Image (tube, grey):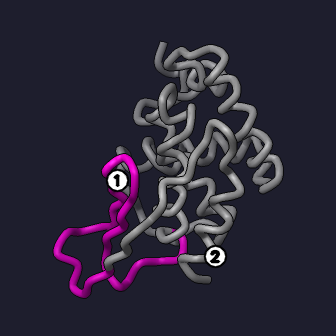
Amino acid sequence: MTWEHYIREAQHFTGPDIKFVPIVEITLRDPNPVPGTCWDTDGKTARIRGGTDITLHTMAHEVFHSVFHNSPLHRYAEHWGEGFCEMFATLMVGHEATGSIPIDYALKYRLPERVISRVCNGDYDEFVSRWFRWNQIALECRKEGFLDRLLGFVPGRGYLHALS
């Protein structure tokens, strides 16, 4: 797979209220001066920086930031961003094989992705459908926290029933 493939796939998640932030630069260095990979934007364009050892999963994850960033979900459920990017990447290439991961990483990336996956039954078409439906709900209700209540989970914190 190539960057172009993931960019084309991610653009299927755009619409009248969801715009793709064009990726104008991808810089991969070996050794990578900064650990990890990052997606960054000036508001109009985006850049991805990382190491030459980037995985297909991480590549797809970073590309999806260009969809999430200009979506109603970003405005009203920004803390779900990493979960949506993980879900996209998982649907594109499968789960990334890792050993043990820090709990803060699990709460911000993996668990939100698993909550979304459970609701979508791990199905690409269902994910696309829910993506557009949840963005529509975000536009209609215009309240932060709506997705937390809808899905019963707060990224970075945990399940709502466990937090009360």
* Residue 64, percent from left and from top: 54, 57
Residue at x 58%, y 47% (from the top left corner): 113
Q: Is residue 163 left or right of residue 49?
A: right
Q: Secondary structure at mark 2?
A: helix
Residue at x 34%, y 67% (from the top left corner): 37
Amino acid beneath label 1: Thr
Q: Secondary structure at mark 1?
A: strand
Q: Is residue 60 left or right of residue 44?
A: right
The residue segment tinted magenta is: 28-57
Q: CA distance from mark 1 to mark 2?
A: 21 Å
Residue at x 68%, y 23% (from the top left corner): 137
In the foreground, 147 or 14: 14
Residue under pointer 1: 41
Mark 1 neighbour density, 10 Å: few (under 14) some (14–19) many (20 or more)? some
- The relative height of residue 132 versus residue 109 in the rendered view (above or below) is above
Q: Is residue 96 left or right of residue 91?
A: left
Residue under pointer 2: 5
In the foreground, 119 or 76: 76
* Residue 27, percent from left and from top: 32, 77
- Please tell me in which quadrant of the rendered image residue 159 appears: top right
Report the number of numbered marks. Answer: 2
Disc with the residue nearer the chain's start (1 vs 2): 2
Quadrant showing the N terminus = bottom right
- Is 50 contained in the magenta span? yes
Residue 23 is marked as: none
- The relative height of residue 44 versus residue 137 in the rendered view (above or below) is below
